[in-house]
Amino acid sequence: MKITIFGTGYVGLVSGACLAECGHQVMCMDVDAAKIDSLKKGVIPIYEPGLESMVGENAKAGTLFFTSNPVEAVGFADIIFIAVGTPPDEDGSADLSYVLAVASEIGRQMQQSKIVVTKSTVPVGTSDKVRAAVQAELDKRGSSLRVEIASNPEFLKEGAAVSDFMKPDRIVVGAESAEVKAIMQDIYAPFNRNSDRMIFMDIRSAELTKYAANAMLATKISFMNEIANLAEILGADIEQVRHGIGSDPRIGYQFIYPGIGYGGSCFPKDVRALSQTGLQHGREMRILNAVEAVNDLQKSRLAELVMRHYAGASLLDKTFAVWGLSFKPKTDDMREAPSRVVIEALWAAGATVQAYDPEAMDEVERIYGHRDDLRLVGTRDAALIGADALIICTEWQHFRAADFDNLAVQLADKVVFDGRNMYDPAKVATKGLIYYGIGRGASVAKS
């Protein structure tokens, strides 16, 4: 089947590559001609495990194409996915300008009836606006061509997006006609062989499902961080509490790991957008507002622990090793990363940051440029050289087996601030190190 996808970000590029991998012919369209030229040369603009090889192999096989020409893109297929960004507007609501611009372009260029599928994360009612935008252009042309609209939200985790697409736990489709449902079943048949993972519903319910899913996961994170902060005050250990509540199958272990808050391109903007949707319809989303407020405060938690440990002393002569910069492992995404709050607070206090991340170094340099108080180094051990203390912001796998003897030798102040609770406080203490975790209660050294 021929498919066109507008947008070559995480969602569009991953979706296009995975659909091509299963035999569909896919054309990815982007208005950024330089980006398209790079993709044609095999240069991938994002880090996502497994994506680079999949894009290269399918482009070589002739199942994956790239273009910046909207006439070519619209003419290529009768099924068009919109997977462009919906960044937060000034009030936190989703900016639909890119989505609606694509819809208008489709209406201007289509020469045959089309099915337009919204895959971008969009507020409830957006599909109606997409239909209206396409139809407005058809009306200008006096065209009788028909457009069908569907919603197919994505549930891809950065760092596992390819795996999530190839082995989905559910495929949500909002559609009105039996024809569209049948076509969507054909598109996803290769991913739906062992059991029926397709969930059909009305379009508005599909649009809300995506926001509700992300808001629920964000709520679990903020709830656990709230409990972790209480545990520290009470002298309890949040890791023991986590095991105690996670064993309840109604709660489960996923997304109840305490830390320094969530970031990335999805949870922050989706929580805000859903809250704004509520306000626009006269409904204050009190839980979601609290989720965001807790998360904003939690991102400053490590910086607070640092300041508490040094008891307000000047940090002008201090160098902090920082392990992990991306908002989560297996990605180079720095959008709303908690590490940014931490290192910016250290700079404000006059400290120097010596940082390492397996994938996000280029992105950090792009964001902050060259600074005298920022040193980007090539390994985790290089970050320790000349450092006074270690701060862990991202739980990359190869940080898990730390050499605590080496840490005790390298760190002048022999202190570790662990924003992801990666280590056993008792084991760290045997090496003569002071250990600060998140919600570790009596195990956390008090200054």
Image: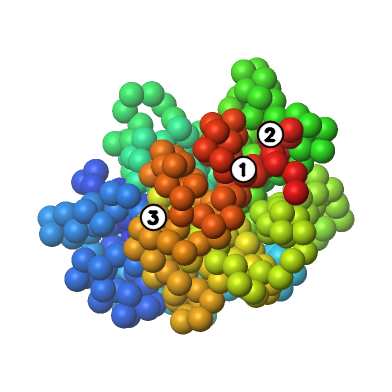
Q: Which residue is mark 3?
A: 381
Q: Which residue is mark 1?
A: 435
Residue 100 can be seen in this image: no
| Dot 2 amino acid type | Ser
Amino acid on which disc 3 is placed = Asp
Q: Residue at x 66, y 69 (%)?
A: 315
The Cα atoms of the two marked residues, 3 and 1, are separated by 18 Å
Residue type, numbered disc 1: Tyr
Pointer 3 or 1: first along the chain: 3
Q: Position of residue 252 (x, y in %)?
A: 60, 24
Label 2 – label 3 distance at C-alpha: 26 Å
**Residue contact between numbered discs 2 and 1, judged by CB atoms under 8 Å:** yes
Mark 3 Cα-neighbour bin, 10 Å: few <14, some 14–19, many ≥20: some
Task: Identify the mark nearer the N-term, 2 or 3.
Answer: 3
Give the Cα distance between marks 2 and 1: 8 Å
Q: Looking at the image, which residue is at 44% across and 42% down?
A: 405
| Viewer-side residue, 400 vs 1 | 400
